[in-house]
Image (spheres, helix red, strand yellow):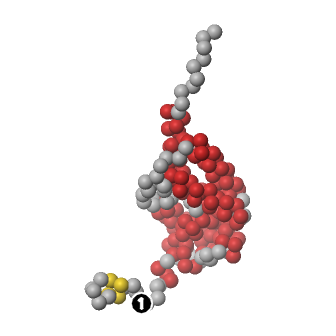
């Protein structure tokens, strides 16, 4: 950072260090990424759950921690998270698990929001769960990942969370609470 004449820090004049951003090596356009990176992104999206940007950030962080290229990290993530692939070395698996743990431990800072109608929330949650299952089964499909991203974004907006994982947890708690405190069943006349 440079300082301005007022003594306050100003914007840096030197270009940013590309190694400071862990996602610098990943392709911004999901349609142009390698199939292994797409598959790993979709798998992370479905399992964590998270949006595609967060999944690529986890992938990039795992690559940086393990000293791998993004494509190598994608293969490692797929191997760690799916049981049908050969296991990666222990150091690589540890890096993947550390990146996943960091993503899940993101700060919970919900914004002030009105609670959604429980019936609307239940319908959207069912759609989100369906897309999550389908994304896990077909992690290679960029169109499906885009639909999952849209559903995840809507869930976050409905509940005022930035993290899909935390929004999903909050939605499930609200739905469960509504079942317990929902409308009383209609009284049946005695026969």
Closer to us: 108 or 140:
108
- The residue at the far left in this view is 7
Residue, disc 1 = 13
The x and y percentages for residue 81 are 61, 59
Q: Is residue 71 above or below residue 167?
A: below
Residue occupying the point 52% across, 62% down: 100
Residue occupying the point 27% across, 86% down: 7
Q: Is residue 115 above or below residue 58?
A: above
User: Badge 1: few (under 14), some or many (20 or more) residues near its Cα, within 10 Å?
Assistant: few
User: Left or right: 81 with respect to 107?
Assistant: right
User: Left or right: 64 with respect to 32?
Assistant: left
Closer to us: 155 or 20:
155
Viewport quadrant of the N terminus: bottom left
Viewport quadrant of the C terminus: top right
- The residue at the far top in this view is 191
The x and y percentages for residue 24 are 55, 79
The x and y percentages for residue 72 are 62, 74
Residue occupying the point 60% across, 11% down: 190
Closer to us: 139 or 81:
139
């Amino acid at each position: 950072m440079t300082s301005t004449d007022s003594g306050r820090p100003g914007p840096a004049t030197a270009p940013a260090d590309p190694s400071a951003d862990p996602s610098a090596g990943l392709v911004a356009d999901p349609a142009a990424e390698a199939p292994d990176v797409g598959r790993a992104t979709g798998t992370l999206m479905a399992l964590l759950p998270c949006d595609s940007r967060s999944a690529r950030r986890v992938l990039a962080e795992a690559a940086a921690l393990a000293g791998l290229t993004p494509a190598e990290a994608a293969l490692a993530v797929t191997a760690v998270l799916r049981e049908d692939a050969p296991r990666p070395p222990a150091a690589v698996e540890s890096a993947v698990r550390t990146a996943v743990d960091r993503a899940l431990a993101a700060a919970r800072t919900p914004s002030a929001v009105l609670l959604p109608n429980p019936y609307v929330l239940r319908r959207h949650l069912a759609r989100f769960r369906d897309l999550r299952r389908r994304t896990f089964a077909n992690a290679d499909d960029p169109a499906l990942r885009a639909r999952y991203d849209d559903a995840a974004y809507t869930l976050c907006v409905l509940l005022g969370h930035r993290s899909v994982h935390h929004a999903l947890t909050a939605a499930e708690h609200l739905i469960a609470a509504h079942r317990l405190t929902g409308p009383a069943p209609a009284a049946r006349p005695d026969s």
